[in-house]
Image (cartoon, coloured by chain):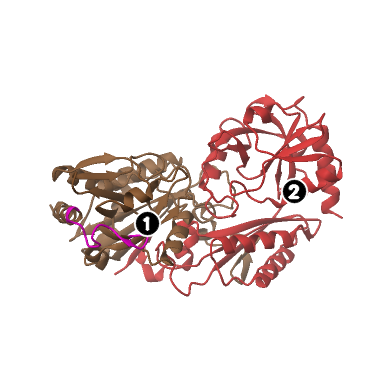
Chain colours: A brown, B red
Amino acid sequence: MNMAMIDDRMLPTDELDKAYLDRGLYFGDGVYEVLRSYDGRIFALDEHLARFERSLKEILIAGVDMAAVRQRIESAFAESGYPNAKIYFHVTRGSEPRSHLPGEGLRPNFMLTVEALGDDDPAKRQGVGVWTHPDWRWKRCDIKSLNLLANVLARIAVQDKGASEAILVDEAGRITEGAGSAFFAVDGSEKILMTRPLGPEILPSITRAIVTQIAQNIGLTVVQKAQRPAQAAACDELFLAVTTKDIVPITRFEGRPVGNGNVGEVTGKLMAEFAAFVRK
Amino acid sequence: MNMAMIDDRMLPTDELDKAYLDRGLYFGDGVYEVLRSYDGRIFALDEHLARFERSLKEILIAGVDMAAVRQRIESAFAESGYPNAKIYFHVTRGSEPRSHLPGEGLRPNFMLTVEALGDDDPAKRQGVGVWTHPDWRWKRCDIKSLNLLANVLARIAVQDKGASEAILVDEAGRITEGAGSAFFAVDGSEKILMTRPLGPEILPSITRAIVTQIAQNIGLTVVQKAQRPAQAAACDELFLAVTTKDIVPITRFEGRPVGNGNVGEVTGKLMAEFAAFVRK
């Protein structure tokens, strides 16, 4: 008989819950999004849903009702009662006995969680330290997939150095992005904001898009160019952009202070503009 | 309240089964192995356990009792009653609310399945067709991790071309391995067996190791060198090596016959030797 074990429990495979036959578990065969709300309103929902739909298409998962996804997000958010919430959701290709090639007629699995999110993160006020790590990820980082082991390993590695984000560096020695964030550098005197151009090496971050828009509004020139770690370390200001915290100043790069070691002036201005933008 | 949804079902996150909080699902944060038995005996169990232990170490999962893993494999295999079985198992870092950085005191999750395996696969007798696909995988393919979306997408892509395995090609235009197998080429007149050298780009395949040993036993010279698809296509014989089927002849490469289009002489000899070896 086809047998299965979950930890020490043996059972016929037929009796396994479908969660244990999820292709998300066996292959990371799914895509996800993370949203947040500000003061009772989900931020940039359309943009996240559009990116999610693209991710599904890129990995050839069909049959997902996007209107139903939107409704689930809205109803779970309402049910949570949190004005400031973090909403995670994913879709996997479905559940079936493990086989690389998916079977016919699979039905995608949906999962979502909502949790409370504070807006008073000390990381935002004081800045964080970052450290570089080789970018071991796959070649389609433009797809927001469940294959995130490289990101996890990078985070674990830099934690040992007291850093809270890993800045990933490609084989050409250039920064791609953070393990869970977009990466920006500021040249204060020239009023330039630098970040890597979009491509298969990085996620088309929605927060990144908003930051570059806001930057232009306040008179910065946005230059899309990949930097070496040494170039980044020499910049006046550095920061991360991530959905759950929008802009997070980087005050230490590989153990050394960035600029004067405090949250930079341009970064502070962008943070204030971002805060105004999300509550418009 | 922290809320979750599984498909259309809403529930407090606290009530989620731990399967839905598995870091294997969120990040592919785990490693796996596939074993097979021949006539009631699990083949190369020590070798697979050693590789598994190395994979665990490489992704920094500690606290897995390898003796217990061995015992679970043996007891589930015995319970199945299958003389020829395929045994899959994985360990993930554990279950907890989603966060890239793992929490303290996580307990790894174990899962295993056993199913029947026939030894009369027509693919082995008639050979299979393969097609190339860009190798989109991460940079640590020496770790047998649950991050397999690139492998899945490659299989789906070549299926549309009537091929049953994708031969992955790196950015330098050289073959790494199959999406789920090792790749070998034979120069019949020179009695040479060619395969890519071990490194972070390929899995240290146990079947590959046995094949190269057997090849030397029957007088072949093993040359470890990465090939371009055009070089492979021009070889006398090609084959795949994979645990569940050991050696599978390739008779069509990108739609064209390999050699005379039949299972090659050297491949046939290796298959016979392998069959003898596993039942020694």
**In front of the other: A248 or B86:** A248
Whether the magenta-drawn stretch holds residue B206 is answered as no
Q: Residue at x 78, y 35 (%)?
A: B192
Tell me if A23 is positioned left or right of B80 in this view. Answer: left
Disc 2 designates what residue? B118
Q: Quadrant of residue A66?
A: top left
Number of other residues with Cα within 10 Å of mark 1, as a class: few under 14, some 14 to 19, many 20 or more: few
Residue A228 place in picture, x, y as percent: 38, 46
| Above or below, comparing residue A32 to residue B95 in the picture | above
Q: Residue at x 53, y 48 (%)?
A: B139
Tell me if B88 is positioned left or right of B172 in this view. Answer: right
Kindly state the secondary structure of the residue where label 1 is placed: loop
Residue A248 place in picture, x, y as percent: 26, 58
Number of other residues with Cα within 10 Å of mark 2, as a class: few under 14, some 14 to 19, many 20 or more: few
Q: Is residue A153 visible?
A: yes
**In front of the other: B211 or A132:** A132
Report the number of discs. Answer: 2
Distance between the alpha carbons at the discs numbered 2 and 1: 39 Å
Q: Mark 2 against mark 1, which lies toward the viewer? A: 2
